[in-house]
Image (cartoon, rainbow, N blue to C red):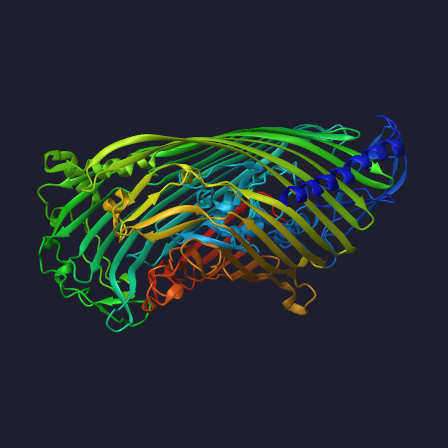
Amino acid sequence: MKLRVLSLLSLFLLFVCIPSLLHSAEVDKSVDGENGSISGVVKDTSGAALQGAQIALQPTSATAVSDAQGNFSIQNVKPGSYTLTVSYIGFGNSVSSVVVAQGQNVQLNTTMNVGSNSQQVVVNGDVVGDAAAINEQRTSENILNVETDVQIQSLPNQNVADALGRLPGVTLQRNEGEGQYVQIRGTEPRLSNTTIDGVIVPGPDPAVRQVDLDTIPAGLVGSVAINKTLSASQDGDAIGGSVDLRIKQATTDKPTISIQGIDGYTPIANGRKSFAINSTAGFRFGPSESHGPGKRFGLMLGYSYDANERGIDDVEPVPGISPLTGEKTFGSEDIQQYLYDRTRYGFAGALDYKLNENSDLYVHGLFSNFRDYGQKYAYQLTVEDNPKFKTSIRRPNLQIEDLAIGGNQVFNHSFLRYQIAIAHSRFGGAAGNPGAEFKVAKHSAIGDDCEYVPGPSQYRPQFSCAVAGNEIYDPTKYFLDTIDLTFGQATQLNLQAGGAMGINYHLGSHASTLEFGGQFRNEHKGQDAYSPEYDSSNGTPMTQYLSSFVNNHFYDGSYHLGPVTNFAAIAGDLAANPENFSLDEGTTHLQSDAANYNLQERVSAGYIMNTIEFGRFHLQTGLRFEGTQTSNTGYLVVNDANGNYVSTTPQHGSGSYVNPLPSAQLRYKIDANSDIRAVYGRGMSRPDPYQLVSYVTEDQSTNPYTIGIGNPSLVAEHANDYDLLYERYLPSVGMIEAGYFYKQITRPIFSRQSIIPATGSPLSQAYAGDLVLQEVNGDHAYVQGVELAYQQHLRFLPGVLSGARINANFTYTSSKNYNLPGRSDNPALVGQAPYSWNIAPAYATKRALITVAASHNGSNIYVYQYQQTGQSIAQLGVTGPTGDNYFYAHTQIDAQATYYIGKGFTVLASGLNMNNEVFGFFNGSPQYLTQREYYKPTYQGGIRWNLHHSE
């Protein structure tokens, strides 16, 4: 059946493309030199290029869209007289008469003026920023959402994930108070792709494909965009969507310089500070174009740096049901303090050279580094067992970089694009966090009085022993048990090359384009790390390593945090007195060998795509083939039943497959300001690299221990995507969108958690009672949803209200994952939040802009762990404490105000997480919490200077 559907789609493509080409040869009967062309540049009155301007040539059906440099070109124009209309939301239309002679290229440059409804561009240029996003969405082949740098800077977005989280259909996976990954349209992060100017970039994390977006500062990009549907010319591994980060480019001959400095403070853990600086400089230079309005060379450079001392108050209880009363209880609880010193910096640059008015060469590059350094202190309290104290330091050093060289050339009846690129990522400290564990003496009575008692809130469970003065907080009772050290890194290198050619032709009076191309990408990813664990032979008292840090206001006083240690002193003791420690070879090999691997993946792709205009219809059809070859090496570690090391054996694997990915995108223009889009596309998602490796790992930082097992039998999952979207563009820079989407997914990959039973198998003998985590293929699934968005500058309101504006969106999704092993229900997909919304009212004058943003992500499954087999009624099934693990719903309020004081200077003040929203996880139902942590608001103030400023 699937092959039949693909065959029919292929025949449809041939029906649209091949007869059109044959007929065009009869109709045009042209050779180079007979027909002419029209090209030009669209700019605003300040000389800045306008991307996304729509150009229409009457009485033909030919249209064009201006690119990032404002350039447009209409090829294969018959000699004659025409009317050229340039439209751009927020600006008045420009209408020109043009005469095309045989073999002539007519250069028609256009300067757009702000429309009467917009009245004026406010001093911070936000009208242009909003208009740029709307116009690019309006003219895109794909269903697209865009956020420009002006919009990003209107709120305290710390990284590009935070910025993307404000777009429709996007929820965030947060980490340490910031967005880390995006979940698009109810799909988990690994189902989305990330590119920089169209180049796939590798994620630093050794275990997953998705990019850690908190690695890249928000101030380093010119815009961010999410392609929710894909053309055949784009990489197909994006079931959820494809995120594109755009590097700023020089678009005006006038020098551009912007510098911004921000200082901040967070009232947590005795006070934490933050500081950030962003700068951009660029201009066009060199000789002028022969027929164009600007210089041939363009250079834009950017730099960003931020340092963020973040504190986190965290509790992590383990919920359950009392076998005696059937009521909720908690068997243990970790009281944890995190202190972070996070630094993030990056460079970005774009250099281009215009060969002529229709062709250019370019070099784009980005480098970003994120040092997520920190330390953790944790008291682990357990009913009917002795307490423990654990400490660890974090030294993750994440890095992403890419460099792309390419060009675009436009001829009389055709165009050519080509590019080579290299992308690299690195994750220092990827194997884990060095730490130490302290225990009390065996058979000690310390902690015997620990039992769960209801707290001031169902979300703040208490233990009777966790009070100041109790022996569990006496450091003289704790002794060093183990030290866990780790070092090494994970890396990935991508080499990529691709090219495409397009042919412009006419089917009767209908302008059409046939495009075909190919791409090759070689990826090499792996990890090389060593994680030794040492046992203390003399049990040095905790008092020998104490730190001076004290937090008397931990968790607003709901919990007491006892004395903590200095990890540098612990590691120093190991270095100075190695005779007091012994290496645990079983744990060391399990942590080290099993985590290391090498993977090579080669992706070869080719596509054909046709675009045709007929009346009010715009149709793009395409077929893409992606072939994948993989080879990997992992390591299987064997320990005996007593945990003693036995052997490490290399495990090799390989695979290859080809995926046909058809697509069709139809746009119908209802009138000049509204249209309907209907889209079909097929996408795919390859397994994460580490998922394919044969390994067994053990994480002893959790309770119970977590055992990871690789699965070389995983196969890629696929999805048929269907979209229907209504768009209406409003006066005074506005738009309304209402859409429905449906994704039909086959063989979805998901993480399955289950407790290892005590049987006779070697795995059970070694890990009985531990929690096993493994990626497996499911049967089939779906996700569907509705997206609504409204954005407008409310200039039509009377008096002072005319400065108001609104940007809001709402998304509803639902999903089911069918026939999961071990359960008869059909749960929602991992990462699918039923409701998400953003609302950002703002008010602007000529000098001031105030924006308040509220963002909501509904609760969604983080990982499946519910197993129906063996569950008693007392455990309350899927909604009970052994249910699936969820993210809590998250609603966060941010705000920022700017005021232009003159001479290019603007002052700003902002508040991040003003409502001190909780972050955490729960099992089954919100009352069965497994983690709840707080970050407190961050208050910031700063100043920005721009060389050129519109008064």
Q: Where is residue 797 in the image (x, y as percent from the top left)?
A: 68, 68
Q: Position of residue 380 (x, y in %)?
A: 22, 56
Quarter of the image where one finds residue 607: top right
Horizontally, residue 887 falls left or right of residue 839, namely: left
Seen from the viewer's position, the closer of residues 726 and 35 is 726
Horizontally, residue 57 falls left or right of residue 135, namely: right
Q: Where is residue 191 in the image (x, y as percent from the top left)?
A: 51, 46
Quadrant holding the N terminus: top right
Query: Is 572 located above or below residue 333 in the figure?
Result: above
Q: Is residue 432 visible?
A: no
Q: Where is residue 348 in the image (x, y as percent from the top left)?
A: 51, 36
Query: Is 572 located above or below residue 757 in the figure?
Result: above
Seen from the viewer's position, the closer of residues 915 and 692 is 692
Quarter of the image where one finds residue 42: top right
Badge count: 0
- Residue ranking furthest to the right: 80
Q: Is residue 455 visible?
A: yes
Seen from the viewer's position, the closer of residues 513 and 948 is 513
- Residue ranking furthest to the front: 760
